[in-house]
Image (spheres, grey):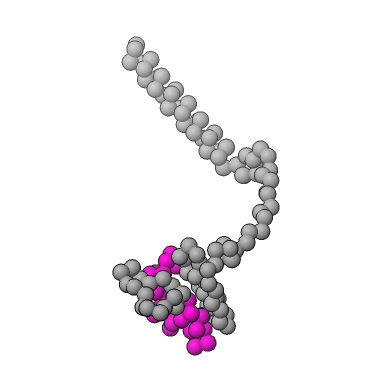
């Protein structure tokens, strides 16, 4: 008798769990709008000024190119390359920018090179190197 009671209890338990899973699956398939209680309110964002405008130490421009050496040591390059693709990159420091120069020189036009060269002149010396006498 106890074995029969145990068998019936297990069957009822399994049947009850499978029915509740079916109901949970059906409720999770409801559309998101039926589950939302209240609409979210969008807060309009205040127009933010460009961070490079407030922290810019030196700006070098050329046709379709802008190179900004920021006071925090980052270098921002924005504009268009020689193929018309958008350039929008910020380098973490002068070392990263110097390492990217060979590629950047190939990517820009001859008219844009002075902006790159001007930015290089403003960079601090690489670690372990000293500025030459007479250089600012």
Q: Position of residue 19 (x, y in %)?
A: 50, 30
Residue 28, by quadrant, is top right
Q: Position of residue 100 (x, y in %)?
A: 40, 74
Q: Is residue 8 above or below residue 112?
A: above
Was residue 73 drawn as part of the magenta stretch in this picture? Answer: no
Q: Main secondary structure of the magenta part?
A: helix
Q: What residue is drawn where x is 51% and y is 80%?
A: 115
Can residue 111 be seen in this snapshot? yes
Q: Is residue 26 above or below residue 44?
A: above
Considering every residue shown, the one lying at the far top of the view is: 1
Report the magenta residues as a range: 91-120
Task: Give the number of callouts.
Answer: 0
Q: What residue is drawn where x is 66% and y is 54%?
A: 45
Q: Nearer the viewer, residue 110 or 60?
A: 60
Q: Nearer the viewer, residue 71 or 23?
A: 71
Was residue 106 drawn as part of the magenta stretch in this picture? Answer: yes
Q: Position of residue 20 (x, y in %)?
A: 51, 30
Residue 11, by quadrant, is top left
């Amino acid at each position: 008798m106890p074995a029969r009671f145990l068998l019936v209890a297990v069957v009822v338990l399994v049947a009850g769990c499978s029915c509740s899973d079916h109901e949970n699956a059906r409720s999770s398939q409801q559309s998101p709008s039926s589950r939302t209680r209240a609409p979210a309110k969008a807060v309009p964002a205040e127009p933010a000024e460009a961070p490079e405008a407030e922290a810019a130490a030196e700006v070098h421009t050329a046709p379709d190119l802008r190179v900004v050496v920021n006071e925090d040591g980052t270098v921002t390059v924005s504009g268009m390359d020689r193929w018309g693709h958008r350039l929008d990159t910020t380098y973490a420091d002068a070392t990263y920018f110097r390492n990217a120069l060979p590629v950047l020189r190939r990517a820009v036009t001859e008219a844009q090179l002075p902006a790159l060269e001007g930015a290089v002149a403003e960079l601090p010396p690489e670690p372990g190197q000293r500025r030459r006498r007479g250089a600012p």
